[in-house]
Image: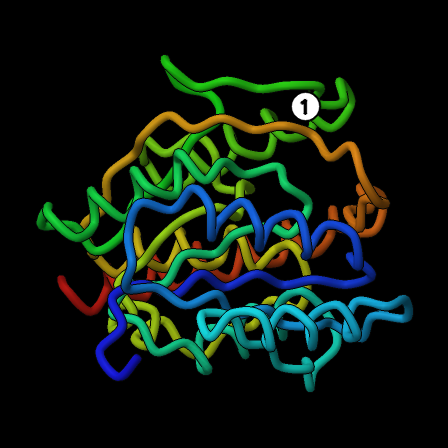
Amino acid sequence: MKNLTFSIVIPCRDEETCVRIIAKEIIEKCRYKSYEIVFINDYSKDKTIKVLKKLTKKSKKIKFFNNKKKGLGGAIDLGIRKSRGKFVCIFMADSSDSVNDLNKYFRIISTQNVDAVFGSRFVKGSKIVNYPILKMILNRLGNILAQILFLTRLNDFTNGFKIYKKDVLNKLYPLVSESFNIFIELPLKVITRGHSYKIIPISYTNRTVGLAKFKINELGSKYIFTLLYCFLEKILINTRIK
């Protein structure tokens, strides 16, 4: 697998059941052959590592690494660095993302002249199943604020399921987010730095197995920090251009 086209980065913490399910779904349903699945174990305390070791023995397409900087931000960072594909897709381990949408991502980014493809759960053609109401309200408020600050059509920054050119991701460093706010840092930097992107509708299904790691009361300040950080970067970039 020297010349891989796609890398699927999947961060996971205490997902012993879900990693098995999602690996099986990708291998069975992905219509492309040149890909790797990169699991990043984020300090799991259950049997996730044991399951991942078994998966790597069953398929050469699967590999995993243990995170060195605890947190989702560190896991994504490590996944990007360890990926070998020309394109890198971030995929969640909780089965909320669709492999059918993954196939769409692969097709679009490999055939069209764009640096990233951003899936949105809130555009025509998208589908949402069992999204918690409170989380939905806070999600929309936060995304509307981001749209206003950055004057963009993208209305779903907080969805982590997106795909990027690897060389574009390398240009976004350093990454400062330590948690779920990494999911808004990446697309915001793509936008503020002038990279091209396409928005498409995707489906989302709230997890039915395992426990959610998203803690609303803990993440508000981190999201605000990331928004302000990227907004300041936008101002600095515009100032340099002028």
Image spot of residue 2 (x, y percent) = 26, 84
Report the residue at 46% width, 46% height from top. Answer: 28
Report the residue at 86% width, 68% height from top. Answer: 47
Report the residue at 79% width, 74% height from top. Answer: 50
Q: Is residue 171 above or below residue 123?
A: below
Image spot of residue 104 (x, y percent) = 29, 37
Name the secondary structure under disc 1. helix
How is this picture coloured? Answer: rainbow
Image spot of residue 232 (x, y percent) = 43, 60
Q: How many marks?
A: 1
Image spot of residue 69 (x, y percent) = 70, 82
The local crowd at label 1, few if under 14, some if 14 to 19, many if 20 or more residues have their Cα within 10 Å, is few
Residue farthest to the top, as pictured: 124
Question: Relative to 167, is 134 on the left or the right?
Answer: right
Question: Relative to 15, is 76 on the left or the right?
Answer: left
Quarter of image, res 87: bottom left
Q: Is residue 26 above or below residue 87?
A: above
Quarter the C terminus occupies:
bottom left
Label 1 amino acid? Met
Q: Which residue is mark 1?
A: 136
Question: Relative to 82, is 111 on the left or the right?
Answer: left
Frontmost residue, 64 versus 50: 50
Frontmost residue, 50 versus 171: 50
Q: Is residue 48 above or below residue 204?
A: below
Quarter the N terminus occupies:
bottom left
Report the residue at 63% width, 28% height from top. Answer: 205
Quarter of image, res 231: bottom left
Frontmost residue, 108 versus 27: 27
